[in-house]
Image (spheres, rainbow, N blue to C red):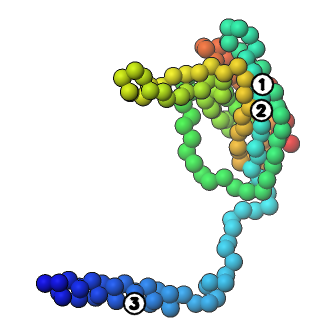
């Protein structure tokens, strides 16, 4: 019985090795040395926009947002589907050409941090922390049609216009 099992294992190993070597032999040297094609063009730009946000009053019904910096790099973001849910406390980024909104981005409000903690029954529960201030960034694929971005916040049922930043 053990000889039969050894023969089966030996056959599987030989078959696996021969399949690997056959695959390796089918790859030519020119294919190995070919450069990797990158589909990024010099006009593709990713922008990292850094902000600082602070609560502006005791009632925490509005915030002060300040633009800190923008870093632009050549590159292209992967196409991802973002959750554009507009329910709850959010920051809203509206990208304009000259007069029209051409794109938008919604994100969870950075002053509202959700954390999971363990309760007295050893169950995880979500708790929201209200921060007084923080830095955060957004990453966008910068398009030629984006001239500026207007940022508003939806916080505690209030809609507040925070700032406008030129992108060109």
Which residue is depicted at the point 49% across and 29% down? 116
Label 2–label 1 contact, CB within 8 A: yes
Which residue is depicted at the point 75% across and 62% down? 41
The disc, 3 or 1, on the residue closer to the chain's N-terminal end is 3
Residue situated in front as seen by the camera: 73 or 119: 119
**Label 3, residues with CA under 10 Å away: few <14, some 14-19, many ≥20:** few
Which residue is depicted at the point 70% across and 43% down? 139
Disc 1, SS = strand
Query: Dot 1 corresponds to which residue?
Result: 65
Disc 2, SS = strand
Position of residue 158 measured from the top left corner of the image (x, y, whole percent): 65, 13
Q: Is residue 101 above or below residue 119?
A: below
Residue 87, quarter of picture: top right
Instruction: Find the distance from the CA under tag 3 to the CA under tag 2.
Output: 57 Å
Query: Dot 2 corresponds to which residue?
Result: 51
Residue 1, quarter of picture: bottom left
The disc, 3 or 2, on the residue closer to the chain's N-terminal end is 3
Q: Is residue 57 left or right of residue 120?
A: right
Instruction: Find the distance from the CA under tag 2 to the CA under tag 1.
Output: 7 Å
Query: Dot 3 corresponds to which residue?
Result: 18
Position of residue 100 measured from the top left corner of the image (x, y, whole percent): 74, 33
Position of residue 122 measured from the top left corner of the image (x, y, whole percent): 38, 27
Regarding residue 96, the answer to whether it shows in the image is: no
Regarding residue 22, the answer to whether it shows in the image is: yes
The disc, 2 or 1, on the residue closer to the chain's N-terminal end is 2
Instruction: Find the distance from the CA under tag 3 to the CA under tag 1.
Output: 63 Å
Q: Is residue 30 above or below residue 37?
A: below
């Amino acid at each position: 019985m053990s000889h039969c099992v050894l023969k089966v294992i030996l056959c599987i190993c030989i078959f696996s090795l021969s399949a690997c070597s056959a695959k390796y032999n089918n790859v030519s040297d020119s294919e190995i040395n070919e450069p990797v094609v990158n589909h990024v063009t010099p006009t593709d730009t990713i922008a990292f926009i850094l902000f600082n946000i602070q609560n502006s009053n005791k009632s925490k019904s509005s915030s002060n947002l300040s633009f800190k910096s923008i870093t632009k790099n050549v590159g292209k973001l992967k196409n991802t589907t973002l959750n554009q849910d507009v329910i709850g406390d959010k920051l809203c980024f509206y990208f304009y050409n000259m007069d029209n909104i051409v794109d938008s981005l919604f994100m969870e409000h950075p002053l509202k941090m959700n954390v999971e903690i363990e309760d007295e029954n050893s169950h995880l529960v979500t708790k929201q922390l209200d921060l007084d201030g923080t830095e955060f960034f957004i990453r966008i694929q910068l398009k030629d049609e984006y001239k500026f971005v207007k940022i508003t916040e939806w916080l505690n049922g209030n809609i507040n216009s925070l700032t406008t930043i030129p992108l060109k």
